[in-house]
Amino acid sequence: MAFTLERCEDSMVFTMESQKSVPAPFLTKTYQLVDDPRTDHIVSWGDDETTFVVRRPPEFARDLLPNYFKHNNFSSFVRQLNTYVRIMSCLLHICTQLLCSIYIYIYIYIYIYIYIYIYIYIYILHHCFCAIF
């Protein structure tokens, strides 16, 4: 979110603008590198298309990395890639915990709702039968 305060004639205008999140340059460059069909003999998508395989690490480092990054060090590329893998793993863990918490709250809400519903039902039945007899 971007907040701006502008002066329009005699008044001040406060606006909020939504900004799209942009992937990190490393991720964008890596995607472009892997997605390029001309480099499939060196690096390409895996069978499930959610992973990629570097088939020829020496050529990858020597010929492709300098075209996208300021270095040709394969180990540095792998280290940076692992950083994003750890970040995504942490985010996945946090989302899983959040979903579990939401599930527990929903379960408690449903349990309380059913308990109250049964209590009211028994109360009504009790008073109806007591009034009859």
Image: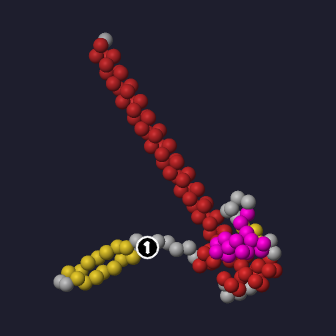
Provide residue 16's location: percent of width, then percent of height: 35, 73
Residue closest to the far front = 38
Q: Nearer the viewer, residue 74 or 99?
A: 74
Q: Which residue range is magenta in the image?
A: 30-46
User: Which quadrant would residue 128 be assigned to in this image?
Assistant: top left
| Left or right side of 39 for 10 | left
Q: Position of residue 131 (x, y in %)?
A: 28, 16
Mark 1 crowd level (few <14, some 14–19, many ≥20, 10 Å Cα): few
Snapshot quadrant of residue 37: bottom right
Residue that extends furthest to the bottom in the rendered view of this protein: 70
Please name whichever residue, 115 or 84, is drawn nearer the observer in this view of the structure.
84
Determine whether 103 is above or below 67 in the image: above
Q: Nearer the viewer, residue 93 or 21?
A: 21
Residue 60: within the magenta? no
Image coordinates for residue 43, horizontal then vertical, percent: 75, 72
Asked whether residue 114 is in view, the answer is yes
